[in-house]
Amino acid sequence: MPRYSGTKIVTNNTEFYAPIRRGKKNIVHYETPILNHPTISDRMSITTATHIWKYGDRFYKLAHQYYNDVQYWWVIAWYNGIPTEANVYNGDVIEIPTNIQQILRMLRV
């Protein structure tokens, strides 16, 4: 299930976007998804794998390794509270939820 499946597409003409509209009346984009954070008991029920970050690691590579699908890189980043790979250093320990369907169900609004 892609991150944006079921996400509303928005036509936006607010003044906030005026500088980047480049003369166009509207910008069409995806509505910002709202993700539920799993409760402590939810997190306790999630099976995770521990991974020690090393040189050459990327979220998309880990998503391919654990989920066989690179599009779920953001799940690993979100679960660990790490916005980008630039915020992870060699030797950092991250947790990877191993059941992608379980974590996606918990994240849904």
Image (cartoon, rainbow, N blue to C red):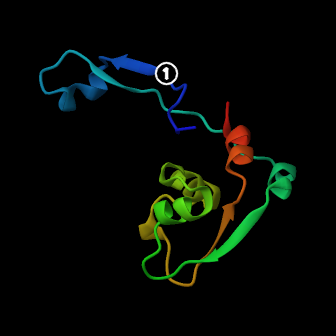
Q: Choose top left, top right, bottom left or bottom right for residue 12.
A: top left
Work out whether residue 87 or residue 8 is closer to the camera in this orientation and state it. Answer: 8
| Relative vertical location of residue 45 with respect to residue 5 in this rendering, above or below | below
Question: Residue at left 74%, top 64%?
Answer: 48
Work out whether residue 17 or residue 37 is closer to the camera in this orientation and state it. Answer: 37
| Relative vertical location of residue 31 with respect to residue 100 in this rendering, above or below | above
Image quarter where the C terminus lies is top right
Horizontal and vertical percent for residue 108?
67, 34
| Relative vertical location of residue 67 with respect to residue 27 in this rendering, above or below | below
Q: Disc 1 designates what residue?
A: 8
| Relative vertical location of residue 31 with respect to residue 81 in this rendering, above or below | above
Horizontal and vertical percent for residue 38?
75, 46
Residue 89 as seen in the image, left or right of residue 22: right
Question: Residue at left 71%, top 59%?
Answer: 98
Image quarter where the N terminus lies is top right
Horizontal and vertical percent for residue 62?
54, 65
Question: Residue at left 49%, top 63%?
Answer: 59
Q: Residues within 10 Å of mark 1 (few under 14, many from 20)?
A: few
Question: Residue at left 56%, top 65%?
Answer: 65
Residue 26 as seen in the image, left or right of residue 56: left
Horizontal and vertical percent for residue 11?
35, 17
Q: Which residue type carries mark 1?
A: Lys
- As helix, strand or loop, the secondary structure at mark 1 comes to loop
